[in-house]
């Protein structure tokens, strides 16, 4: 048997050091565990200051004992390498483990064990935990705002169909892949726009536009199968025919007059709200800010001085002011700039404001990509005789946009996180609805539950988005 | 110069002029109809409203311009507090993300992912309406270290009461100036003779001794005023004396610094990772100590990567502090673009002043950053 030296553990007496160390560490964790989960204090006979520090000291000594280099045990080496490289690291690791053990029981009891979800009034919430009943009762409002309950299927239907139309890209066969960009950049936003503005909003104007949409969609889908020779004629003739057929042959409006179908009720934008409004606002701003930002970034790099300075002015102005003042401007200052009889809907004003604001950020991100491209790319494209637009569309932008995927994704994330600010103009998306529900005299004192709920929702949305952008980045990564 | 170059520019210019013309024409017509004339004369009028929390004296008899100053100072206050804490947390978390300890690395990563994926406004609301509302009432509060009182009505901290504060400040300034001189002298000495001077210990000594001298001989005197509980009514209590930090300020500063710290942490991480390994190895191979490697080789290069995006984050924090309006912290947007606008109805003037203030701030900082970037850029031959 070799000499034992507990200050400098080595490989010779591996087992002794290992057993003592592991015992000490387990003992310290066990003490904290019992204390925190079952509120039993094993070492209560000691003075308070010592019993507070004892687990830490025990664990520290234990970790020190098992810190043996090249012990030959794979597991031990792994632990040492990852959490136990030196005294300071060991101390921090222990601290983190203890804090987690200490924090778990109160969190568990608040979230699950003592929480209430049954029942449908405030009275069931007697425990010390969270009152999820509050979320359950208000769930509808948090999702749809003041949108009438009977009409909410319209929001659901629109979102489901838009989600479905959005995933078409994954199912497209090789033959249709080349049309996908056109579809996502032009067709899809238009469909979405009409869906949201004329289906969710409702009102008499709905019919004409919906006929147009249906005609356009059907003709585009059939259009894929038409030989390119006739495509030109096809896209002029078929949509118009379809439109006329829908409008005058199917007699939708007459069916309504006969009472066989009901017209959609008009829901003003002030009544929209909740998470669906968050989606609507961020969706539109996302669609609009990208092309505006693209043009601004091209304008900033333009050779024409006037265009260049106008672009720089636009970008620097929007980037220099906080979003909240932009929204203030759109709500109190902008109406002064319009003719008196002209009225633009609040939601539209907000969407324009946020789009312009985020477009400036998108422009700077894209400019970064444009600057990162080597000059040779421009020269090569020009030497092939390409003009400005052809060069940018075919050579420059595909490469530049690929480079800036993470930056654009970050801007879009910021956009989604900025949508709650529309409370300034009186539109209540989910955070605004939470604040409204919080002040309801019947449901006072449940602010925490509401904010936790919304935080979890936003976290899921934003985290999923950032992970998706990361995947996209990996997918389009090209070696240079 | 041909027509192809001039035409698009002229068209753009025409469109912009038309839009502006349309807007300003409408604005004139609208203002005439409402009987307002455009002008900034209202700034000197009596404001006749009160502000809860202000750094300078303010009440209803002061002018709108002073209201603007109050708002601006409050914005600057919360931004400075936020920037200080965000930097501290951000640097610590950024370094923790590079730690070789798995637990620390994960904890830092969870913190970053969590706080930056939740909207800032939601975080402000959470701290203000949920977390700080759970604090005890003034009469039930147990003091921290005997002098700090964290209550639902705000955070009460002791205040220093100074005699001859100016002498103390002069002594501090004198200490800082002499430290600067000593540094220059030490560098020259090292360049000429190769002898190192213990600059750090001399600086610390100066920083302690000079203010101490001002206490002993300059007639400077400081005492601490501890907040004392005071009964207002049957059940209403508050603290008197000391400094009161209102809950709006605390929750705003807390949310701003926790949120911005995640971005700063990422900047720091990217900066330190951006220094190539070869640099450290080369520095070690010419015999620099680990401390010297960090101070002379790694940090200068890492800072070059870290500082520009971090300044951007500071700017973002300042702009985000305008969310104060949501919880009624009297910052520039709430006091000026909110209350003052409601009272005067001068939308165009007030919104333009507010925007111009933020614009001036960010443009001057970005000009400074451009200059700084040019200065520190690696000069390639």
Image: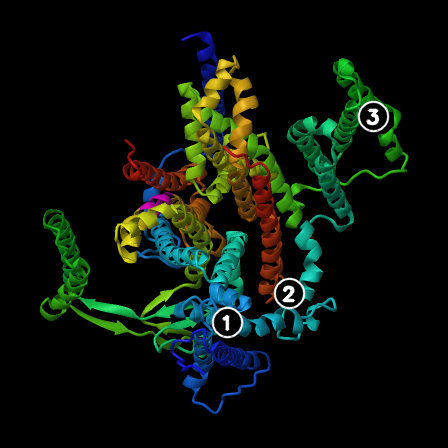
Confirm whether circles 3 and 2 share one chain: yes
Mark 1 or mark 2, earlier in chain = 1
Q: Nearer the viewer, mark 3 or mark 2?
A: 3
Q: Any mark on residue A443, and which? A: 2
What segment is highlighted magenta in the picture?
B301-308
Q: Any mark on residue A247, and which? A: 3
Residue occupying the point 29% across, 69% down:
B159
Secondary structure beneath dot 3 equals helix
Residue A232 or residue A287, whichever sits in front: A232
Report if residue B63 is visible in the image: no
- Give yes or no for residue B306 being in the magenta stretch: yes
Mark 3 or mark 1, earlier in chain = 1
Q: Nearer the viewer, mark 3 or mark 1?
A: 1
Q: Quadrant of the C terminus of chain B?
A: top left
The reply, left or right, for residue A22 in relation to residue A279 is left
Measured in 3D between alpha carbons, the distance from the residue under mark 3 to the one under mark 1, in whole angstroms, is: 67 Å
Confirm whether circles 1 and 2 share one chain: yes
> Where is residue B40 drawn, in percent x and y?
35, 37
Residue occupying the point 74% across, 27% down:
A175
Do callouts 3 and 1 mark residues in contact (Cβ within 8 Å)?
no
Q: Any mark on residue A113, and which? A: none
According to the picture, the residue beneath numbered tag 1 turns out to be A99
Query: Pointer 3 indicates a residue of which chain?
Result: A
> Where is residue B202 drawn, in percent x and y?
15, 61
Residue A199 or residue A180, whichever sits in front: A180
- Give yes or no for residue A35 being in the magenta stretch: no
> Where is residue A88 drawn, in percent x and y?
39, 68
């Amino acid at each position: 048997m070799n000499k034992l030296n507990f200050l400098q553990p080595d490989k010779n007496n591996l087992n002794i050091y290992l057993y003592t160390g592991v015992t000490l560490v387990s003992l310290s964790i066990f003490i904290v565990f019992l204390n925190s989960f079952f509120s039993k204090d094993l070492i209560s006979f000691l003075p308070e200051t010592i019993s507070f520090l004892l687990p830490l000291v025990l664990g520290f000594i234990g970790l020190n004992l098992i810190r043996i280099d090249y012990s030959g045990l794979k597991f031990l080496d792994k632990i040492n390498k990852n959490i136990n490289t030196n005294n300071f690291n060991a101390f921090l690791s222990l601290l983190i483990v203890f804090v987690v053990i200490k924090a778990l029981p109160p969190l568990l009891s608040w979230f699950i064990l003592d929480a209430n979800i049954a029942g449908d009034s405030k009275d069931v919430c007697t425990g010390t935990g969270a009152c999820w009943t509050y979320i359950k009762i208000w769930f509808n409002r948090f999702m749809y705002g003041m949108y009438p309950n009977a009409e909410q299927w319209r929001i659901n239907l629109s979102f489901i169909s838009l989600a479905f139309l959005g995933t078409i890209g994954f199912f497209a066969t090789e033959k249709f892949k080349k049309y996908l960009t056109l579809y996502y950049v032009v067709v899809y936003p238009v469909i979405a726009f009409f869906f949201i503005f004329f289906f969710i909003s409702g009102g008499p104007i709905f019919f004409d536009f919906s006929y147009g949409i249906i005609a356009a969609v059907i003709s585009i889908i059939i259009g894929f199968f038409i030989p390119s020779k006739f495509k030109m004629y096809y896209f002029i003739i078929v949509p118009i025919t379809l439109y006329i057929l829908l409008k005058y042959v199917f007699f939708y409006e007459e069916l309504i007059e006969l009472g066989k179908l009901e017209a959609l009720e008009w829901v003003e934008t002030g009544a929209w709200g909740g998470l669906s409004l968050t989606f609507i606002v961020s969706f539109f701003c996302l669609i609009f800010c990208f092309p505006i930002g693209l043009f601004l970034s091209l304008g900033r790099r333009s050779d024409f001085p006037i265009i260049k300075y106008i672009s720089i002015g636009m970008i620097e102005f929007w980037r220099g002011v906080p979003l909240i003042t932009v929204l203030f401007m759109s709500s109190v200052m902008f109406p002064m700039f319009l003719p008196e009889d002209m009225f633009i809907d609040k939601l539209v004003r907000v969407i324009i404001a946020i789009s312009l604001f985020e477009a400036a950020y998108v422009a700077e991100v894209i400019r970064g990509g444009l600057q990162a491209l080597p000059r040779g790319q421009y020269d090569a494209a020009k030497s092939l005789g390409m003009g400005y637009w052809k060069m940018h569309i075919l050579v420059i932008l595909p490469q530049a946009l690929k480079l800036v995927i993470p930056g654009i994704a970050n801007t879009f994330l910021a956009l989604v996180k900025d949508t709650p600010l529309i409370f300034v103009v009186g539109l209540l998306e989910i955070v605004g609805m939470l604040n409204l529900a919080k002040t309801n005299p019947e449901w006072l004192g449940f602010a925490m539950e509401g904010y936790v709920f919304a935080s979890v929702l936003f976290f899921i949305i934003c985290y999923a988005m950032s992970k998706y952008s990361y995947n996209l980045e990996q997918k389009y990564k090209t070696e240079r | 110069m041909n027509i192809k170059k001039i035409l698009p520019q002229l068209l753009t210019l025409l469109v912009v002029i038309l839009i502006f013309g349309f807007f300003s024409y409408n604005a004139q017509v609208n203002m005439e109809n409402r009987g307002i004339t455009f002008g900034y004369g209202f700034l000197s009028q009596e404001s006749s409203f009160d502000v809860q929390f202000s750094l300078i004296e303010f009440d209803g008899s002061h002018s709108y311009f002073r209201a603007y100053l109050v708002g601006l100072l409050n914005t600057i206050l919360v931004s400075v507090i936020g920037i200080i804490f965000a930097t501290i947390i951000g640097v610590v978390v950024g370094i923790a993300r590079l730690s070789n300890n798995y637990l620390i690395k994960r904890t830092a990563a969870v913190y970053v992912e969590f706080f930056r994926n939740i909207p800032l406004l939601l975080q402000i609301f959470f701290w203000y309406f949920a977390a700080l509302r759970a604090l005890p009432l003034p009469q039930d509060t147990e003091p921290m270290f005997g002098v700090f009182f964290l209550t639902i009505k705000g955070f009460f901290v002791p205040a220093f009461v100074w005699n001859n504060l100016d002498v103390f400040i002069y002594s501090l300034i004198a200490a800082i100036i002499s430290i600067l001189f000593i540094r220059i002298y030490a560098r020259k000495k090292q360049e000429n003779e190769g002898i190192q001077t213990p600059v750090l210990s001399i600086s610390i000594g100066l920083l302690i001794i000079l203010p101490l001298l001002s206490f002993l001989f300059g007639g400077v005197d400081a005492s601490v005023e501890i907040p004392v509980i005071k009964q207002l009514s049957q059940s209403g209590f508050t603290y008197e004396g000391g400094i009161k930090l209102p809950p709006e300020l605390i929750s705003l500063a807390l949310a701003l610094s926790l949120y911005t710290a995640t971005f700063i942490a990422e900047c720091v991480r990217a900066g330190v990772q951006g220094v190539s390994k070869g640099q450290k190895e080369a520095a070690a191979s010419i015999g620099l100590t680990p401390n010297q490697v960090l101070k002379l080789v790694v940090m200068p290069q890492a800072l070059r990567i870290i500082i520009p995006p971090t300044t951007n984050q500071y700017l973002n924090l300042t702009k985000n502090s305008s969310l104060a309006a949501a919880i009624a912290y009297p910052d520039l947007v709430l006091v000026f673009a909110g209350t003052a606008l409601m009272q005067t109805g001068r939308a165009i003037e007030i919104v333009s002043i507010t925007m111009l203030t933020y614009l001036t701030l960010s443009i001057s900082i970005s000009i400074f950053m451009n200059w700084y970037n040019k200065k520190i850029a690696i000069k390639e031959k």
